[in-house]
Image: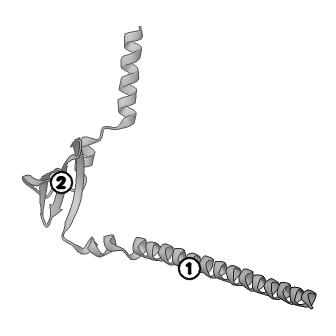
Amino acid sequence: MKLFFLLLFSVASCQAADEAVNSASGNLLQVTLSLVLVLGLIIAISMGFKKFGINRMQSNLPVSVIGAVSIGNHQRLMVIEVGEEWIVLGVTPQNISTITSLPRQSAEVTVTDITKPNFATWMQSTLEKYHAKKN
């Protein structure tokens, strides 16, 4: 009789252990699928913002940035276009100051054309100076 109860108890405990394993694997599968769904949703939303995001909505504003030059650590000079006028701004983390305003310039002349030298020209002149010193 004791053997019968021992056998019945061992069968019942094996069934309980099997149900626990099946339940744990089912929960693990459910958690994994939920995680994949949430990550996919985040990726889809970020792609949507990239394609139809805030930058696209602001393109119809009458203000545009013409150029910017860094003049120090966290300090910039920016030229923005508002209507038919260019405004030169001094920008720091604490303050934005209007420096001057200019009439709108032609499209060929921009701030970036003036401030950025041509690398090939600079390199050629530097090499010529180096060879002149060497001879």
Local secondary structure at mark 2: strand
* Residue 17 visible here: yes
Left or right of 43? Residue 74 is left
Gap in angstroms between the C-alphas marked 1 and 2: 45 Å
Q: Residue furthest front?
A: 1
> Upstream in the sequence, badge 1 or badge 2?
1
Which residue in the protein does label 2 denote?
A: 79
Left or right of 53? Residue 96 is left
Q: Quadrant of the N terminus?
A: bottom right
Q: Is residue 112 above or below residue 6?
A: above
Residue contact between numbered discs 1 and 2, judged by CB atoms under 8 Å? no
The amino acid sitting under disc 1 is Leu
Left or right of 42? Residue 106 is left
Query: Horizontal and vertical percent for residue 20?
Result: 72, 83
Q: Quadrant of the C terminus?
A: top left
Residue 37 has which mark?
1
Pick whichever, 106 or 21, lies toward us. 21
Query: Horizontal and vertical percent for residue 111?
Result: 22, 48
Give the residue at x 27% y 72%.
Answer: 58
The amino acid sitting under disc 2 is Val
The quarter holding residue 50 reads bottom left
